[in-house]
Image (cartoon, helix red, strand yellow):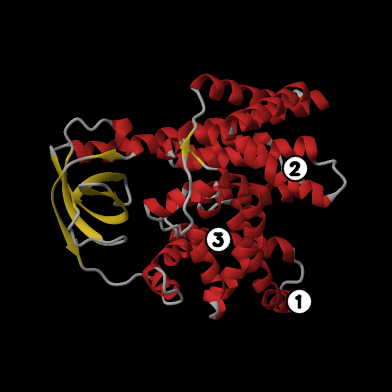
Amino acid sequence: MIILEQIKQNKNLISFIGVLFVIFLLNISIEYSKYQEVVYEEIYETNVELVNIYEKEKVNVLKLENGDFQFFTSVNKDSDLKKLDFIEIAFLTKKLDFISYLKGFYSKNIYFEKLQRNDTFKDKLIQKINSNHKSSEINEVFNALFLAIPVSSELRDTFANYGITHLIALSGFHLSVLSFLIYWIMYFPYTFFHKRYFPYRNKKFDLLLISLVLLFLYLLLTGVVASLLRAFIMLSLGIFLLRSNIKLISFTNLLFTFLIIIAFLPKYIFSISLWFSLSGVFYIFLYIKYFNELKSMIVKLLLFNFWIYFAMNPIVHYFFTNTTYEQLYSPFITMAFTFFYPIELLAHLFGFAGIFDKFLEIFLFKEFEVFDVSTSLSFFIFFIFLSFTSIKSKKAFILLNVFLIGFTVYLYT
């Protein structure tokens, strides 16, 4: 019986992966047809949203998005453009290949024109956030935290120098806070109707489903950010598995999350944000596997934040070389952020959003001594291999920690 049950599970697994593969092929073909439409002529004209502006020495580089793809172009520094403007633009498509189209490409523009549009619900939320603060930098922080609006390159560097870029990128922590708030806001009104009209239903499960629907709308509002999408799919998968009495914390579930995302949104395979998000969850699962038996909650909490930070360092420094001693504050800032984020969320809802602005200004305008340290390709590959091996081997996990200590010494000495 056990063997038959295992065969049945394997068949279901293969069928599920097969369905995802078919969905992937369908979506990649749709993406390719959109690509062909773009490159059909050497000049392509479209309406786009200005996602971000990167100031360079002689020009400004614009990050643009039209719903199907994103790309970069350069304009004169005196151009009257600001973030979230709506633009009509024509750009060159010659030599644009399909992979570059999926990843996001750079192209020279022929002309562009700023368009007028009516304020959307998202625009009104941005205006509401901005009305609470005098500093444009602080506005950027909260627009990023609540609506996934990219911050300027200067602020991005500041967060990287503190080692807290993961706190600004919306992901699992932010979604868990929002789901908690939604659940308890809906709890008492739903309880009233539940008792009177449908007491036979599972109240907790219904509230989780309502939370999922509202979180999905929030996901759409933010423009389906890769890291937030990962968190939403894992939450949805977790609720389904919980309903089916299946183990929630599993490396297999993380793999399924990745496969689901890539099946429906193939271009996200090139998203560094998604890979960082998946890596973070992977090391959280690895931590739980080997350290969950620690008895002291204080020790477990401290070790969790420090170990995850150090475990991510070899991966982060393969892509980004900026290194500062202030990055060692990252675990402490992450713990403080656990309280800061929900407090600020409530503060913006109830009209006392400027409560921490003075401290934030000090925090954001600190000067850093920055030096470049990178992870070599050979060590990066070895570290990834050792990480995957640690899923099954405790000896590999011990060796992983030895190399983490060595890399940390190398990084900061």
Residue 403, image x, y percentages? 66, 25
Q: Which residue is mark 2?
A: 246
Q: Residue at x 55, y 46 (%)?
A: 163
Helix, strand or loop status at disc 3 = helix
- Residue type at mark 3 is Leu
Residue 333, image quadrant: bottom right
Q: Which residue is mark 3?
A: 215
Label 3 vs label 2: CA separation?
Answer: 23 Å
Label 2 vs label 1: CA separation?
Answer: 29 Å
- Residue type at mark 1 is Lys
Image vertical order of residue 46 relative to residue 42, above or below? below
Q: Which residue is mark 1?
A: 195
- Residue type at mark 2 is Ile
Residue 111 appearing in the image: yes
Residue 271, image x, y percentages? 44, 39
Which comes sooner in the sequence, label 3 or label 2? 3
**Left or right of 26 on screen, residue 397:** right
**Mark 3 neighbour class, 10 Å CA radius: few under 14, some 14 to 19, many 20 or more:** some
**Left or right of 336 on screen, residue 274:** left
**Mark 2 neighbour class, 10 Å CA radius: few under 14, some 14 to 19, many 20 or more:** few
